[in-house]
Structures are given as C-alpha cells and as structure tokens.
Image (cartoon, rainbow, N blue to C red):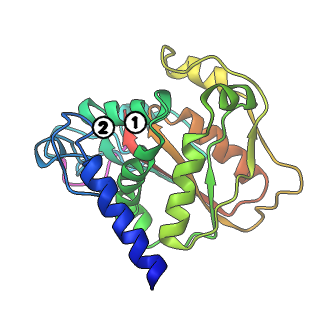
Amino acid sequence: MIALHKSELFQAAVSLLYPATCTICRKHVRTGEYLCEICEAKIVRIVPPFCEQCSEPFEGSINTTFTCANCAHRTFYFTAAVAAYRGRGIVRDVIHEFKYNRQIHLRHLVARWLCAALDDDRLRNQQFDLIVPVPLHPARQRERGFNQASLLAKLLSAQTSIPCRPLLKRVRYTTTQTALDRSERMENLHNAFRLRKNADVRGLRVLLIDDVLTTGSTLSECARVLKRAGASSVHAATAARA
C-alpha cells in the first residue's frame, strides 16, 4: 500500500511539473491523452463505402460491397486488409513523429487506432490464433532503433490476449516504397520476406499487423509467405490507410 501511495504521489508530481500536452497543437490535455478535442475531431475515420479488400474509401453512394480499382486486377494473399483511419493530416503527422522522430510514447495512440480496426465487420467475428508484425530489415531497424509494427503488435496482443510472434524476417534490403508506383512496389518486395527458422504457422489463423496500408503490396507479400507455409488464413490490420 505504501509503495502504491508513493507511486501515485510521484505520478501526480510529474503531472504538475510536466503537464500533458496535445501532440499537435501543444494545448494542455488530460493525463493519458495525446490529442486535444479540437485535434481529435480532425482525424478521419474510414467508414462505408470502402473497398472490402483494401479499405480504400469511396466518395459515392454505393450501398453494396465492392472492390476498388487498386484491387480489381491484382492477386492479394490476405483475405482483407482493414484500416481504421485515413493516413492524412494529423494521423500522418502522429505516425511520422512515432516512426521517424523516435516519439516512442505515441505508440499508445497509434495502437488505439489499430484496435479500432478490430471493430470492423471483416475482423470482428474472426478468431485469430496469432498476431504477426510486418518485419523491418535488420539494417533499417538498427537505423530506426525499433520496428513500429512490432511495438504496435505487442500492444494489440496485450489488449486482445492473442499471442504475438515475430515469425517473419526481411531478408532483402529494399529501397523505400514511398516514391514507387503499384507495380514497382510489387517488384521491389518480391522475395523480400521469409519465415523464421523453426517457425510453424500450419493451420493457424494469422492477423498481420503494420502501421500504414498504402497499396497493400507489403502486406500481401508477407501474407504470401505465411500462406505458403501453411497458414489457414491471413487477415491484416493497420492503424491508417494512406
């Protein structure tokens, strides 16, 4: 009881000395929050209508499920890739601060967005045996200091009690995907991933995790490796859709 009391006093003192502020505008926020109400209201949740396979939103009056032009003539190895928020504006800024400016504490906010993806109909009723994060190449992970997908997957595992295992490894260093078109991304990623030694996914239902979905090429290549190794199904979830 005394230790708990001291801990509470310490946290209260820290809050007084370093009050929580909004990640974007620096206004004061409640302890444990990362965005003020005004900034929170600016983030855009992905809602129907959207592509059933890659979550690309459609600004129209479609009332039935559909596949977007990005997916129409492609073979994806995941059943569906679900993203919760549009990766623009504040969402993009937060993820960039997390990934590239080493603001590791923001993983908790991004993980909240990722958890929101699990409420989607395409994932809500699925039973998953395993959470697998998309890996970084060892050289890029040394440069960054961490793998953002792995941090998010661990937080999601703690929330859902689904085991998290880093069963994939990136065996080929690839150039950044940012400036590449869809076909170039696919070529860039070919044979870039491999299952780790002694990893066994035979018959397992896998939830693949990353921070952002762009064209789906990275997730699909990871899913291809998992399916080829015997996974019975692979779904994907990300915090944002670029």
Q: Which residues are magenta?
A: 62-67
Residue 77 seen in the current view: yes
> Where is mark 1, residue-wise?
95
Residue 121 seen in the current view: no
Name the residue nearer the viewer: 72 or 172: 172
Give the SS element for disc 2: helix
Name the residue nearer the viewer: 105 or 61: 105
Quadrant in the picture for the N terminus? bottom left
Q: Is 92 rendered above or below residue 231?
A: above
> Is residue 65 rendered magenta in the image?
yes
Q: Is 99 rendered above or below residue 107?
A: above
> Is residue 85 rendered magenta in the image?
no
Q: Which mark is residue 207?
A: none
Name the residue nearer the viewer: 131 or 220: 131
Q: Main secondary structure of the magenta part?
A: loop
The quarter of the displayed image where residue 143 is located = top right
